[in-house]
Image (cartoon, rainbow, N blue to C red):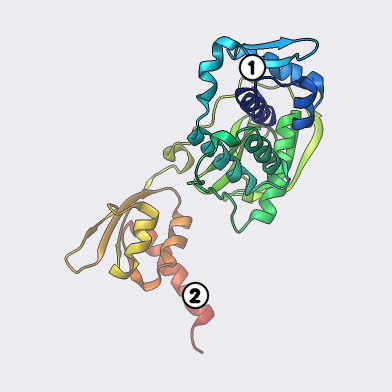
């Protein structure tokens, strides 16, 4: 698997070659802050990917795309470059370093004549947890790059445990960041949410890369269903249902309330979510959820009830 930063560098080198007649290996090495040997390996990788690159020695020599490929130099259009930069800005929004901003500057510098108009897409992947997430993302990227084991304490719903994994992918899915890796505790691939990780550390122990399957990010896999619910919501919280589940997630009841039916994954999380609606939600099914809500309401009454 091509490493993440190497992939970014290959895109940058290809962009430079598409815009310039010729460039030398020392120029590329200086621009991308790597050695000439690394640039030579990158050029070999681009050739293996089918890009017709030629190299010439001596005066006016350098690296270029073959003449017969000139007509395809505009393969990266203005829209293509804007989409690439939008993706890089998204990664930069959670980065703990200046790497992605520097990469954007390099790409923009070599693509100015193809960058027409204004940006039409801005992606911000940061959250309230940015200060905690950025260092974790940086550590995980380094561990993936170096093929080092990761160790951390993990807070799962059922228990807390010390974990050691072979990290393979950083994943952003449904507003959350995860790391996908081989867990020695479960002897299988697992998806770990970064917000539940503590004392994250890149160890000095190297591992041999496996034939890694891509994580299954389907809703059924990440959020397994199993609890069939029927809930009536007041009209004035309709916006929340639309925001979280879409405008077709409910039917209007005879009394004007909104009937919401869904399959959910976890009784405790479901109970916590419903309680955020206060008296504006009434659970019809299942009875177990009604009982759990009543028990929680009684406990709250003991805490906040008048003496």
Regarding mark 1 in the picture, which secondary structure is present there? helix
Tell me where residue 58 appears, x and y as whole percent: 80, 10
- Residue 123 in the image: above or below residue 273: above
Regarding mark 2 in the picture, which secondary structure is present there? helix
Tell me where residue 26 appears, x and y as whole percent: 80, 23
**Residue nearer the viewer, 243 or 43:** 43
- Residue 203 in the image: above or below residue 292: above
- Residue 191 in the image: above or below residue 45: below
Tell me where residue 220 appears, x and y as whole percent: 42, 39
One can see residue 154 in this view? yes
Q: Residue at x 35, y 63 (%)?
A: 239
Q: Quadrant of residue 51?
A: top right
Specify which label sits upstream in the sequence, 1 or 2: 1
Q: Residue at x 75, y 13 (%)?
A: 61
* Residue where numbered disc 1 is placed: 46
Q: Residue at x 48, y 56 (%)?
A: 269
Q: Residue at x 43, y 57 (%)?
A: 270
**Residue nearer the viewer, 222 or 36:** 36
Image side of residue 240 versus residue 201, left or right: left
**Residue nearer the viewer, 136 or 69:** 69
Q: Which mark is residue 300?
A: 2
One can see residue 198 in this view? no
Tell me where residue 174 appears, x and y as whole percent: 49, 46
């Amino acid at each position: 698997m091509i490493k993440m930063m190497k992939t970014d560098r290959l895109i940058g080198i290809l962009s430079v070659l598409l815009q310039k007649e010729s460039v030398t290996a020392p120029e590329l090495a200086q621009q991308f802050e790597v050695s000439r040997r690394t640039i030579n390996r990158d050029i070999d990788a681009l050739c293996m990917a089918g890009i017709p690159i030629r190299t010439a020695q001596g005066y006016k020599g350098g690296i270029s795309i073959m003449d017969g490929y000139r007509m395809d130099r505009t393969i990266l259009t203005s829209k293509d470059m804007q989409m690439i930069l939008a993706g890089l800005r998204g990664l930069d929004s959670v980065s703990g370093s200046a790497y992605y901003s520097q990469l954007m500057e390099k790409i923009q510098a070599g693509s100015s004549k193809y960058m027409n108009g204004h940006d039409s897409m801005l992606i911000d992947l940061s959250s309230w947890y940015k200060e905690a997430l950025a260092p974790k993302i940086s550590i995980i990227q380094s561990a993936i790059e170096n093929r080092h084991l990761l160790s951390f304490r993990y807070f799962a719903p059922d228990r807390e445990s010390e974990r050691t994994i072979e990290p393979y992918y950083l994943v952003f899915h449904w507003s959350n960041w995860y790391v996908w890796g081989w867990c020695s505790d479960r002897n299988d691939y697992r998806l770990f949410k970064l917000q539940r990780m503590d004392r994250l550390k890149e160890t000095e122990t190297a591992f041999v890369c496996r034939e890694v399957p891509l994580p299954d990010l389907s809703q059924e896999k990440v959020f397994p269903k199993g609890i069939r619910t029927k809930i009536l919501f007041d009209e004035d919280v309709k916006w929340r249902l639309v925001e979280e589940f879409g405008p077709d997630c409910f039917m209007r009841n005879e009394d004007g309330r909104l009937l919401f039916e869904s399959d959910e994954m976890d009784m405790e999380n479901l109970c916590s979510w419903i309680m955020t609606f206060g008296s504006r939600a009434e659970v019809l099914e299942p009875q177990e959820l009604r009982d759990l809500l009543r028990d929680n309401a009684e406990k709250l009454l003991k805490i906040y009830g008048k003496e």
